[in-house]
Amino acid sequence: MTDNNHDIEQPVERVPKRVIGTPSHAATGTSLLGAEERAGSAEVPGVNLQDEATAKKGERIAAFCFLLAFLAGIAFIVSYVAFQVGDLDSAATSNLALGSSLTVALLALASGIVVWVRMVMPKYKLVQERHAMASDGETRSYVGETFLQGAAESGITKRPLLRRTLLAAAAPLGLAPLVLLKDLGPHEYADFPKKLRHTVWGEKTKEGKPRRLVVEGTGAPIRAADFNSPGGILSVVPEGYEHDLNELAKSTLILIKFRPEELKSGTNRNWAPDGIVAYSKICTHVGCPAALYEQTTHHILCPCHQSTFDAADGAKVVFGPAARPLPQLPIAVDGEGYLVATADFPVPPGPSFWERGDAEAEAREKGRQS
Amino acid sequence: MSTATVPKPIAGTSSFLDDRLGAGNFMRRNLRKVFPDHWSFLLGEIALYSFIILLLTGTFLTFFFKPSMEHVIYEGSYAPLQGIGMSAAYASALEISFDVRGGLLMRQMHHWAALLFVAGMMVHMLRVFFTGAYRKPRELNWLIGVLLLTLALLEGLTGYSLPDDLLSGAGLRITEGVAISLPLVGTWITFFLFGGEYPGEDVISRFYSLHILLIPGILLGLISAHMILMWVQKHTQMPGKGRTNNNVVGAPFYPAFMAKAGAYFMFTFGVIALLGTFAQINPIWLFGPYTPADISAGSQPDFYMGFLEGALRLMPSWEVNLFGQGGGTIPLSVLIPALVPMGLIMTGLALYPFVERWITGDNREHHVVDRPRNNPHRTSIGVSAMTFYGVLWLLGANDELSWVLHVSLNWTTYVGRVLVFVAPAIAYVVTYRICLGLQRKDAAIIGHGVESGVIKRLPHGEYIEVHVPPSQDIEAHMRGKEPVPTLPGTGNGSGNGSGDVPPKALRGPIGRLRAKMSAAYGGEKIPLDDGHGEGHGHAAVGAGEDDKPAIH
Ligand code: HEM
Ligand code: FES
């Protein structure tokens, strides 16, 4: 226990007369609580006994509560056996039976104890003295001296060789746990920022064909001619990676069909066959899927912090905390009439990161050169 | 009936223990340890008991939960999701909900207990702040408390991510997006946390060991330290009759406090069971498995993360690119909201006791707490900070707000951007006025007594209401007021000593600022007894002055 030397601040004298007897010597064989007086004799200041009528009433109420708790406890066990689970309804029934019996048991127990304290136990107004936390000057100086003396005896102050080599010994061991954490990352970190910049849209399929856009959920490829009602929208993932969460976290698209005249200069029309535009669905703020679309305004809205992007104008930010437009994916129609990606996003999709640099400027420059 | 004998089994065990541990000495000092009584002392207990309930329900959950992101096809008994691919973690959370008896109850109780844990801690902390109970000698326990709150937020965050449903995934994605935006270290942190790219296959099991081992372990250690310090230093008490800075008035640990504590534990447990039974929380089966490609609209984090969410929503779209191409990106629209409010609040909390001590020069021990009105600047600072937090928190649900209030979403944000600065300032002024008003009312009661409701007709026909002196208890409670200490030589309005040379520590620019702040922060704004007693005198208490009982 932790009471070592707090006796300074815990005086026994002020505790009312009814103090527990000093522990008797083991040899006498009497109990620790041996010299106990009868609790709560009326003379003790600060301990006001309840009158017998109140106590009696309290006893009865508390007993009733405890009995109720007992019954509810039994009901809990019975419910466990009686109500099986295995589907939505039976789980709900079991939950109700177990939960309400547990609730009643606990609350009845609590109420019983409160009644016991309030009506049966005395009303207390005990006074205990309090002393300053600090130890007295003599103790402090004793501790100080002892500390110095011990340090001198150990030689740590006088023997620098000992001290320095000890420190040297501790340093690498202290680093060891950090070193051990290195393999939390699987491969060389050096590739990592590069990986963040690229998605599978930039890679051809195994057959060497451009990768098709497929509908999220069904995995069906999208025929440009079928996706023809203006204002239509689809959530799209890369063919072959429909269930690869790491890839989906970067590559998911939102596909929107426009009337050609609706598109403004921010959108690259070369990448918009038949007015079909593909933007990254991963919000450039902190990466939620920007899943909401308002047809009339052409606004893409991210439900997380409400960044709003103008889909007709290069998905530029019109409201909210996102700082950059959703990158547009270059797409085209392949020989069979399906939508495919012709290249990767010009800039890294998703949330910003340090190594991203000014990717937009880079992309513009590249665009100018080609 | 004087001496009863202790029953054999108890006597036997107790002497067995005493022979080996000397436990008698400890018991002698502590069995009748006095605990003061005030409803607000219960708030911390709620947090404590919720933590115990978290340990109990959480341990139950660990027996069934599978912290793995391995892809499985669901074949459990919840029909709508049968045959769907998901992580083993999500499948096991569904199993807990539908195929383990009591599993749903335990999950819901665990979640409710987590909310009550954090809420209890916050309200408890406000009580300690507004009554000045953090003052010497309790600053260390205050710091432990701030640490506990921070860790609890982390614990909640990791727990929320475990079931790996669509909602928990949205939280995780935001966490990742914030982490990766940190300058220089961002990609390193996410690389190591997620074992490569987001979401990877590692994060759930890593969060799991943080959630059930590391953080609870630290919490347990800190909570124990918190309790031991409280035990050693004893509770503070409200000012009142017979209560001084040198005593504790209340009920003994054994039997009254012990029984009451047991009852409150059962109450907390019972209320959590009630909520877990009747108030559905986090119905993960409705959200479906996590995929980074989807999100359920209107996703909300748990309430304690709301202020961060609000800060993120409030921020304008600022981002800078350093050093041009190939240089570094600093997404201020993520960094500022993620770091600044939390940093301000936690640092402010941690430093407040020390800053206040520096400003007031008050180095005494305080065991009788202040009524909030009696330290108006502290109270105003507290309310102002709460308002700041509150605005962010409300803005975290601005979509709901705009829906309920029928205003446009964007307007809630614009208004919020202004309010987050203006509202705390207004709150400060208003609170300050209210505090002084309440002080004035106290002074009136001490000076003229309370309205008795008895109307008397004076000989010349005028009616008056008879005022009677307040009851002793109330008067003692009010007279517990002390002027807020100021540094020696800075008392404002006291006239004497204004010509003196200021003490050394108060010269120089910082010293002068300190003296100014001290004069503004401290002093007696509304003296309790006009004309006599305290008057305008500022008990300019210097460092090291002896304890002064609160009741003269
Ligand atoms: C200390 C012992 C604890 C253990 C052993 C534990 C264990 C667990 C486990 C296994 C889960 C996932 C089960 C599921 O949701 O189906 C879980 C979820 C959770 N835990 Fe804990 N936990 C502990 C403490 C805490 C604390 C202190 C907090 C809060 C501050 C907390 C908050 C949460 C939350 C919010 C969830 C999500 C629950 C849900 O979605 O229904 N846990 N915990
Ligand atoms: S993640 Fe889209 S607005 Fe924050």
Image (cartoon, coloured by chain):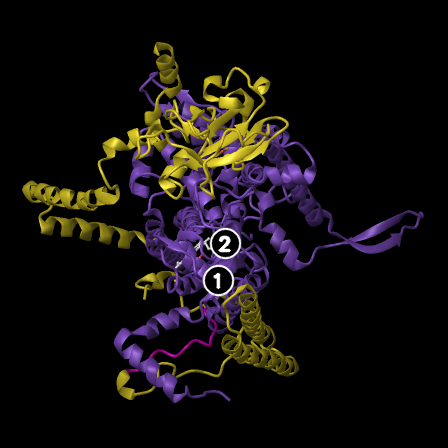
Chain colours: A yellow, B purple
Specify whether B64 is left or right of B528: left
- Residue B513 drawn at (x, y percent): 46, 26
Q: Report the amino acid beneath label 1.
A: Ser
Q: Which mark is residue A339?
A: none
Q: Residue furthest right?
A: B461
**Residue assigned mark 2:** B284
- Residue B11 drawn at (x, y percent): 36, 84
Dot 2 and dot 1 residues touching (CB under 8 Å)? yes
Nearest the camera: B183 or B280? Answer: B280
> What is the quadrant of residue A65 in the picture?
bottom right
Nearest the camera: A163 or A50? Answer: A163
Please tell me whether residue B309 is drawn above or below residue A310 in the rendered image.
Answer: below
Please tell me whether residue A285 is drawn above or below residue A138 in the rendered image.
Answer: above
Specify whether B84 is left or right of B188: right
State whether label 1 is within 8 Å of ligand 1. yes
Q: Which mark is residue B97?
A: 1
Residue range corresponding to the magenta coloring: A15-25
Separation of residues labelled 2 and 1 (CA atoms): 9 Å
Give me the chain letter of mark 2.
B
Specify whether B421 is left or right of B171: right
> What is the quadrant of residue A22 in the picture?
bottom left
Whereabouts is ligand 1, in terms of quadrant? bottom left
* Residue B115 visible somewhere in the drawing: yes
- The disc, 2 or 1, on the residue closer to the chain's N-terminal end is 1
Q: Secondary structure at mark 1?
A: helix
Q: Residue furthest front?
A: A336
Residue positioned 62% across, 37% down in the render: B432
